[in-house]
Image (cartoon, helix red, strand yellow):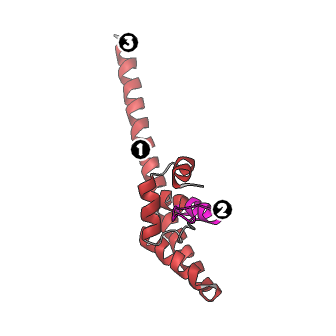
Amino acid sequence: MTIAEVSRKYGMTQDTLRYYERIGLIPQVPRNKSGIRNYDEESCRWIELMKCMRSAGVQIEALIEYVALFQQGDSTIDARKALLMEQRDQLTARMEDMQRSLERLNQKIENYENGLMATEKKLMKQ
């Protein structure tokens, strides 16, 4: 697939795709005889993974390290697993923080709703 097709498919700009490749966030994309990127299934799987991880808030530096470890082969399996587990722990902590924030917001909204209802009841009695 061309970079334009991949850009449309994943909702990412062509500049972002080039940037991800340049910094090592995705492995080098195969090129045709003219030197134009020709994204294959493996390249697309890497893009999907990175898009998912980035949307989860995983830092670019951690992902670059993961790709570099992956490219070094099976001797890095334990290091890759440890990196992923660390990222999972950080994501879990962020989700817990967000859940606490959501609960607080819901409580505040409920307070407003209860306050408004009490005010309306007072108006109805007058």
Amino acid, disc 2? Glu
Q: Is residue 97 visible?
A: no
**Which amino acid type is shown beneath numbered disc 1?**
Leu
Q: Which residues are magenta?
A: 32-50
Residue position marked by numbered label 2 in the rendering: 41
Q: Residue 75: x, y in percent? A: 62, 89
Q: Is residue 56 left or right of residue 115?
A: right
Quarter residue 119 falls in: top left
From what the image shows, is residue 122 above or below residue 82? above
Per the image, the residue denoted by label 3 is 125
Question: Of label 3 and label 1, which has the lower sequence position?
Answer: 1
Callout 1: few (<14), some (14-19), or many (20+) C-alpha neighbours within 10 Å?
few
Mark linked to residue 105: 1
Whether residue 67 sits left or right of residue 40 in the image: it is: left
Which residue type does callout 3 highlight?
Lys
Query: Circle 2 — which element?
Result: helix
Report the mark closest to the observer, 2 or 1: 2
Distance of label 3 from label 2 (alpha carbons): 69 Å
Identified at 56% across, 74% down, the residue is 84
Q: Kindly indicate the quadrant of the structure image that contains residue 70.
A: bottom right
Residue extending farthest front = 34
The quarter in which the N terminus is drawn is bottom right
Magenta stretch containing residue 73, yes or no? no
Could you say where residue 56 lies in the image, as x and y percent from the top left? 50, 59
